[in-house]
Image (spheres, rainbow, N blue to C red):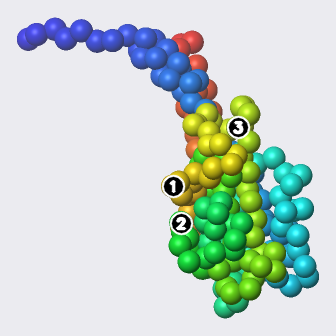
């Protein structure tokens, strides 16, 4: 019978410990566009004033809540945003409860494509600054004057609300912490 060499369990444990310690979990904030008013033209919400004081990061979730019979959300390029042109959106959202995860730095332009709504102010520029942040992973930045040419969002499926996504993220983080604790115990034994 041939004798097989085995890797010592302490070596495996140390390797797993190093691997787990390198995992970084980034949790984005959830921003409801328009706060309690939501995404609407009623009540004269100023979406420019709503977004101006906020510091958005890659990984943040932008939540558009609205009556889907009267509104929608279109991600558009800068020129379409400025002119309220909804004829060629990058992507259109119509559920009335759209969770959009920002996946890149730069400007992300959204408007309502219902005629007259954008002109009435139902549009928002989500600007993810190019400065580094410990909260956001590094990615290539786009110039503030030129928007990203491809969609820079990830859409959560309807069954995965922001609160469920946050819960899932916490569960994943807890699992990694538990795994790390077990690895340390095994290493010490």
Q: Residues within 10 Å of mark 2 (few under 14, many from 20)?
A: some
User: Residue at horizontal 58%, vertical 24%?
Assistant: 21
At mark 2, the secondary structure is loop
The answer to the question of whether label 3 and label 1 lie on touching residues, with beta carbons closer than 8 A, is no
Residue 71, horizontal then vertical, whole percent: 69, 84
Give the quadrant of residue 41. bottom right
Residue 86, horizontal then vertical, whole percent: 61, 76
User: Residue at horizontal 71%, vertical 66%?
Assistant: 82
- Can residue 71 be spotted in the picture? yes
Q: Is residue 37 above or below residue 136?
A: below
Furthest residue in direction left, as rendered: 1
Q: Which residue in the protein does label 3 denote? A: 130
Instruction: Answer with mark 1 or mark 2, whichever residue precedes in sequence.
Output: 2
Q: Which residue in the protein does label 2 denote? A: 90
At mark 1, the secondary structure is loop
- Nearer to me, 136 or 187: 136
Q: Residues within 10 Å of mark 1 (few under 14, many from 20)?
A: few
Residue 100, horizontal then vertical, whole percent: 63, 61
Q: Residues within 10 Å of mark 3 (few under 14, many from 20)?
A: some
Give the quadrant of residue 83. bottom right
Q: Is residue 57 above or below residue 83?
A: above
Q: Is residue 35 above or below residue 13?
A: below
Alpha-carbon distance for marks 3 and 1? 17 Å
User: Residue at horizontal 58%, vertical 57%?
Assistant: 153
Q: Is residue 159 left or right of residue 127?
A: left
């Amino acid at each position: 019978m041939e004798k097989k060499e085995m890797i010592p369990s302490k070596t495996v444990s140390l390797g797993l410990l190093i691997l787990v310690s390198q995992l970084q979990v980034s949790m984005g904030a959830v921003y409801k566009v328009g706060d309690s008013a939501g995404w609407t033209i009623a009540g004269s919400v100023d979406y420019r004033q709503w977004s101006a004081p906020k510091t958005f990061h890659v990984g943040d979730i932008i939540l558009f809540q609205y009556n889907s019979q009267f509104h929608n959300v279109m991600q558009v390029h800068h020129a379409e945003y400025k002119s309220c042109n909804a004829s060629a959106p990058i992507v259109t959202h119509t559920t009335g409860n759209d969770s959009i995860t920002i996946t890149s730095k730069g400007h992300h332009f959204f408007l309502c494509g219902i005629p007259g709504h954008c002109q009435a102010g139902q549009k928002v520029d989500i600007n993810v600054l190019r400065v580094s942040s410990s909260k956001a992973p590094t990615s290539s930045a786009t110039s503030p004057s030129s928007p990203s040419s491809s969609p820079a969002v990830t859409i959560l499926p309807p069954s995965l609300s922001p609160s469920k996504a946050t819960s899932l993220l916490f569960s994943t983080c807890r699992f990694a912490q538990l795994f790390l604790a077990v690895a340390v115990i095994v290493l010490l034994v």
